Amino acid sequence: MSTLIRLPEGSVCWPVAALDSAAHDVHHAQTSVNRTHTAERSASGMTRWERNYADTSAWVEWDWVEIGEGTVVQVDPLNVRSNVLLLDDQGRPLLSSRRKATLATLVYLLPWQGPVLDKLRLVTPTRRIAAHAERLAA
């Protein structure tokens, strides 16, 4: 029986021990915004963070939702998509549950809310004007 692990093309291996340094090397790559017109949720989207290497990029991405003006949270902290295979101290892949928890920790270490809020301000500058107009009309 072979112990060779076949990774999808573009996958990157990270030892869990390198998580702290990875959090410092990962940068914001993109954020998408989806507008909804319900009172409960005014915006949602996805954000992606990357670490570039010579021939590929390691990335993590997750969905977020705006729960109030100036406040964004992850939709599901244990649902972080990634092309990263996390390895334990012996070089073996982490179990799925531990991988989810470790990626959730990485997201916690990233200052992701700032870039998401910046994107929201760029995409929806008229929202604040409309809200101000509503308050004046009331």
Image (tube, grey):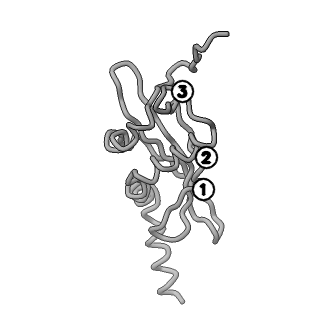
User: Residue at position x 45%, y 65% from top?
Assistant: 126
Q: CA distance from mark 3 to mark 2?
A: 22 Å
Quick one: 83 or 44, which is closer to the camera? 83
Disc number at residue 79? Answer: 2
Left or right of residue 110: residue 94:
right
Residue at the far front: name it.
90
Identify the residue position indicated by label 3 in the image.
Answer: 92
User: Residue at position x 46%, y 35% from top?
Assistant: 59
Amino acid residing under circle 2: Asn
User: Residue at position x 63%, y 10% from top?
Assistant: 2
Q: Are marks 1 and 2 in contact (CB under 8 Å)?
A: yes
Residue 20 lies in quadrant: top left
Q: Which is more foreground, mark 1 or mark 2?
A: 2
Q: Are marks 3 and 1 in contact (CB under 8 Å)?
A: no
Residue 52's place in the image compared with 5, above or below, is below
Q: Position of residue 40 (x, y in %)?
A: 64, 70
Which quarter of the rendered picture does the N terminus lie within?
top right
User: Residue at position x 49%, y 73% from top?
Assistant: 130
Quick one: 64 or 86, which is closer to the camera? 86
Amino acid residing under circle 3: Arg
Quick one: 90 or 34, which is closer to the camera? 90
Q: CA distance from mark 1 to mark 2?
A: 8 Å
Other residues around mark 3 within 10 Å, as few (<14) / some (14–19) / many (≥20): few
Which quarter of the rendered picture does the C terminus lie within?
bottom right
Numbered disc 1: secondary structure:
loop
Residue at the far top: name it.
1
Numbered disc 3: secondary structure:
loop
Disc number at residue 75? Answer: 1
